[in-house]
Amino acid sequence: MTAYEPPGTPGPAAPYDAVVLAGGAARRLGGADKPGLRVGGRPLLDRVLAACATATTTVVVAEPRETARPVEWAREEPPGGGPLAALDAGLRHISAEHVVVLSADLPFLDQATVRRLLDALRTGDAPQGPGRPDGVLLTDPDGRDQPLVAAYRADALRRELTVLTVAHGGVTGLPLRRLTAALDLTRISDPVASFDCDTWDDIAAARARIREHGNVLDEWISAVKDELGIDLDVDTGALLDVARDAAHGVARPAAPLTTFLVGYAAAQAGGGPEAVAEASRKAAALALRWAAEDTADAKPTSDAKPTPDAG
C-alpha cells in the first residue's frame, strides 16, 4: 500500500481513547526500566502520555507506577505475554470508536502527530479510495511499519483479536504482525515521531537531539509545563522578546524577573494565552520606554524650565 501524507494542519480531535503498552522486558537495554528512563528530564512514559493527553481514557498496560497525569492500569495474563496480549488487555478498558495505540518509548511523539493519525483515520482520505481504513500508522525512515504508533478503529482490533484467539486458543506470544496483516492500513511517513528507544545508543541519540539548538527551548518549556502541571500554550516568542528588551534596556537580571512578573500578572488576570500576550505587550512597551530615556538624543517631554527655589 502506498505511503500517504495527510494535508495541512489537523483540526480539533473528536473523542478518542489511548492504550499505551509499557510492560516489555527491554532485553536490548539489559532489562532496564525503559518507560522510566529519562529523556529531556522526563520519563519516556510521561512523554508519551503528554502526546495523548487529550484522550478521554488512557490505559497503560504495565505494573502501576507514578505518572505525570492520571491513567487507568491494566495487565495482560500472564504478564509478559507479548504485545497482542497487552493490547487485548488494554482494549477491555476503553469504549471509544477510535483508539490510539502507542509504545512507551517514543521520545519525540507529540499531540500534533496524534491528531494527524486520528484525522487520517476519520476522513479515510487516502489513495486507495473512499473506504475508511482500519488503522493509520507511522513508518520509520526505512519505510518499516510502526504499529505501536498508530490510530485504529477499536472494532477492527477486537474483530481480528477474536479471530486469532479462536484460531490459536489465545493471543499470548503471537507477534503483532499477525494482527496488522489482516487490517486495511494507511501509512504516514514520519522519521522523527516514529523514533523509538530500543538500545542505549537510541537513548543517547534522543538525549543529544533534544539538546540541539533548534530543539532545546521547546523541549525545556514542555518539560517545565509537565513538571508544574501547566496545560497552557503561549507565544514563547513574545516572552523571549520581553526578556530581551528588559535585558538590553534595563539590566540583564531584569529579564527573568520581568518574565516572572508577566506570568504572575497573567494569572491575576485569569490566565490563558490572551492574558499572557497582553501582559507581555505591556511589559515590552515599558522596557522600550525605559530604554528610550537613556539614549543620547532623548529630549525632555516638556520644554518648561524648572521653577527656581524660592528660598
Image (cartoon, rainbow, N blue to C red):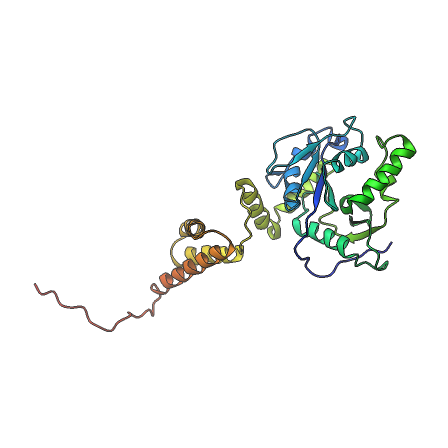
At a point 75% along the width and 54% down the height, the residue shown is 122
Residue nearer the viewer, 191 or 272: 272
Q: In this view, does 273 lie above or below 90?
A: below
Q: Is residue 27 above or below residue 187?
A: above
At a point 33% along the width and 64% down the height, the residue shown is 293
Q: In this view, does 22 lie above or below 55?
A: above
Q: Quadrant of residue 45?
A: top right
Residue 140: image location, x then y, percent: 78, 48
Judge from the rendering whether residue 159 lies leftward or rightward of residue 193; answer left or right: right
Residue 152: image location, x then y, percent: 78, 46
Count every numbered label the image shows and give the total.
0
Outermost residue toward the front in this view: 95
Outermost residue toward the right in this view: 167
Judge from the rendering whether residue 53 lies leftward or rightward of residue 161; answer left or right: left
At a point 26% along the width and 71% down the height, the residue shown is 302
At a point 61% along the width and 50% down the height, the residue shown is 215
Residue 204: image location, x then y, percent: 68, 39
Q: Quadrant of residue 251?
A: bottom left
Residue 155: image location, x then y, percent: 80, 44
Residue nearer the viewer, 311 or 177: 177
